Amino acid sequence: MIRTTMMTKNLTHRYVLVILLSTLLHPSTVAGAIVLGEQNDADINVGCLFPLTGRGGLYGRDSQIGIQIALEKLAQSPDVYPTLKVVIEDTRSKASRATRIVKDFVEKGRSRFICGVVNSSVAWQVAKVAAQEEVFFIGTDHASSRMTSPLVSPYYFRVNNNTQQSAIAGAKYIKEYFPNSAEKPIRISHIAPDYDYGYTIWQDLVDALDSLGVHYQVVTTLWPRLYEPNYSAFIKALLEKPTDLVINSMWGGDLVAFIQQANNTSLFSHAKFANFDTGGNYEVLVELGKDLPEGLIMSARHHNNWPHTPLNQWFVSRFYELSGRYPSYAAEGAYSGIMAIAEAVHLTGVDASNDALKTALEHLSLRLPEDPEGFSSFMDPKTHQLQQVIAIGTTTGSNSKLSLPRLLSHWKIYYPER
């Protein structure tokens, strides 16, 4: 009798898993929104905000696949994790549109969780509205530390590393690998987009250099507008003054355009070049190909070729199976957001109070694709910022199965303080 019951139970689980995976791989579209996971009576409704069109559309499309992979992972343990219905709407990178969508998610979609957002300025507005609605906002792809220091809202939690974490790792790298002294400080030039993200990461880097006692001199700081098409004047300004290290804090298409234009000058022989937050994103490596010079110092929030763990290799391979390409870091951020929501609800129950969910999120520990062996990402209960390992590498020639002429290697690994 026991054997029969167990066999029936196992067959039921397999049947449920097949149905769930079929749903995940064939998302539905309702009034322009993408619906993933449980289509009807889910335990938890989640509303996600990403740009799906325009210049930031790749991040949204990668995030959608990252969410699908997370739901697949959860479906493997149907007795452990709640069922989720995830609705994704296109923000078009506009704050006014994103805040209207949040209200619809809550009022019409009965969402207890909001996730996503690529742009830090949009995320700031979304966090305010989510707090008014008393729903949790799980940030997955924006990085301004102004969201967490001080904390923008008690309902806000971020699962990708922020500018402060990247800046601290970058400052440690500079202290370790660039000679500096009071008599001969390292000369630094910085260029970043002229909006919140750019200002914040520069201030975070200055604070980190100061706290580590690095002797440095600021040669110049430059602030091109976001989506600037022509960087020739900025590159000329960087070349005009002696500099030991040019730190570029652009991202996406802006960084690609800058490097392509700088290749026509002597900038990369004029000084060392680094991007400590987004430069090593797979999207950038693909777009530049052989145009990416070797020896650039870069990092990203997730790497396809580090760490060499079964979980990361599975995540990258599964993304490729679903899309025919490899993921940008946005995909792993979205995966992390869904896993964080599921874990918090698993720990508290589907009918838990906001206070119980908040406590669970504040003490969250997650094993994520970006985590090296022996480490799990963990939440800082004061800042609501997930603490993660930062890996900084240099661009080198590659014969990897990722089929790129340049990848990051010679990794330097920086762990967060507990």
Image (cartoon, rainbow, N blue to C red):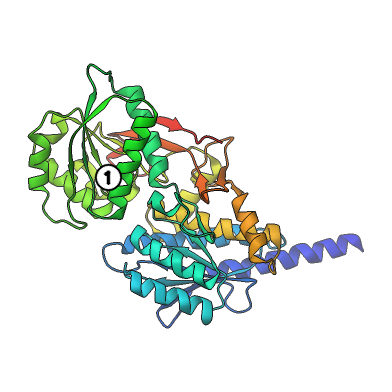
Which percent across, then down, holds residue 272?
A: 21, 30
Quadrant where the C terminus is found in the figure:
top right
Which percent across, then down, holds residue 56?
A: 30, 62
Which of these two is toward me, 236 or 206?
A: 206
| Left or right for 328, reference 133 | left
Q: Is residue 331 above or below residue 1?
A: above
Q: Is residue 304 above or below residue 356?
A: above
Q: Is residue 184 visible?
A: yes
| Left or right for 212, reference 75 | left
| Left or right for 117, reference 159 | left
Quadrant where the N terminus is found in the figure:
bottom right
Q: Give the residue at x 52% y 54%.
A: 336
Q: Is residue 185 above or below residue 191?
A: above
Disc 1 crowd, CA 10 A, few/some/many (<14, 14-19, 20+): many
Q: Residue furthest front?
A: 150
Q: SS class of the residue under badge 1?
A: loop
Which of these two is toward me, 293 or 357?
A: 357
Q: Give the residue at x 52% y 41%.
A: 371
Q: Is residue 47 visible?
A: no
Based on the displayed image, in which of its 4 quarters is residue 395 positioned? top left
- Residue occupied by mark 1: 249
Based on the displayed image, in which of its 4 quarters is residue 280 positioned? top left
Which percent across, then down, holds residue 384?
A: 53, 51
Q: Give the residue at x 32% y 45%.
A: 201
| Left or right for 61, reference 3 | left
Q: Give the residue at x 34% y 73%.
A: 96
Q: Amino acid at mark 1?
A: Ser
For the image, the number of numbered tags is 1
Which percent across, then down, holds residue 330?
A: 40, 55
Q: Is residue 271 above or below residue 44?
A: above
Which of these two is toward me, 365 or 205?
A: 205
